[in-house]
Amino acid sequence: MSNFEQFHFDFYQSNYTIDDQEEGCNSSGSDKNLCESRKSQTEKQPPAGAFVPPDMLLSPQSYTGQILQPAYSPDTLSQFGYADGFAEEPPLLEELGINFEHIWQKTLTVLNPMKPADGSIMNETDLTGPMVFCLALGATLLMAGKVHFGYVYGMSAIGCLAMHALLNLMSVSGVSHGCVASVLGYCLLPMVILSSSAVVFSLQGIPGTVLALFIIGWCSLSASKIFTSALAMEGQQLLIAYPCALLYGLFALLTVF
């Protein structure tokens, strides 16, 4: 074993160093180009035992990034799906379910009962407009000296549940709670006009009663038109308008008395 260890030490022992190679190259001028080519090859080659990814060995392109700052490559981002990611995202208000264009179209549909309703827009569960109109109705009643916020929200909830059950019995496709609440809430806008009139003059008389009946017919006609368009219930508008008139008649009683 001692002879083998001595042989192993003699075999790997060498006095050759890189400095001697550089001195040899400097001394001989004829082999200067050969030495420079060997140095460049030695610098490019990685040390033995070091792990080198195959991408670095195959790609001839050099690294152009800075320290702690990788080089930007749009192709790499597009491969992972990060390119134009923020441009494809919808706006924040649309993610929250607030679409001002649809709100304006629904409001115009309610204000004009003779205008045909778009069933695709009216079938949405948009509660932004109904909440605003309920608050406006309560605020105008408060200006008239009537604190009826609880009555407004209570009758709205009971009316939505009753209309949801009725429409599911009458229609084939069925309807959701959000759609019923959205339509009934948007059609509450004429009732806000009636409550605003109660701030200016008293509705307890013949003119007030006539105006209240007109507003009830307006609300029920708009709601029945939207329900028939959204649920494809042609020929059943009068059947839907009757329960809607009963519901909006309760709001009219709150406003007049």
Image (tube, helix red, strand yellow):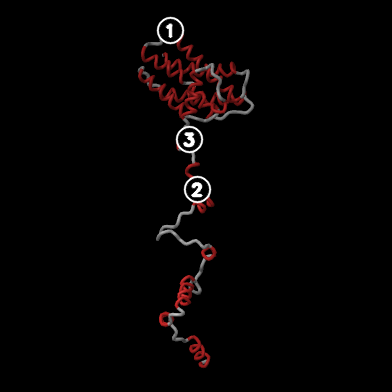
Eyeballing the image, is 124 above or below 62? above
Mark 2 nearby-residue class (10 Å; few <14, some 14–19, many ≥20): some
Q: Quadrant of residue 23?
A: bottom left
Marks 3 and 1, the one that precedes in the sequence: 3
Q: Indicate the secondary structure of the residue bearing disc 2.
A: loop
Nearer mark to the viewer, of 3 and 2: 2
Q: Indicate the secondary structure of the residue bearing disc 1.
A: helix
Label for residue 207? 1
Mark 1 nearby-residue class (10 Å; few <14, some 14–19, many ≥20): few
Where residue 2 appears, as percent x and y from the top left, is: 51, 92
Amino acid type, label 1: Pro
Image point (49%, 41%), residue name: 89
- Which residue is label 2 attached to? 83
How far is the residue under mark 3 from the one under mark 1?
43 Å
Marks 1 and 2, the one that precedes in the sequence: 2
How far is the residue under mark 3 from the one under mark 2?
22 Å
Marks 3 and 2, the one that precedes in the sequence: 2
- Which residue is label 3 attached to? 94
Eyeballing the image, is 146 above or below 205? below
Please identify the residue farthest to the right as the structure is shown.
Answer: 172
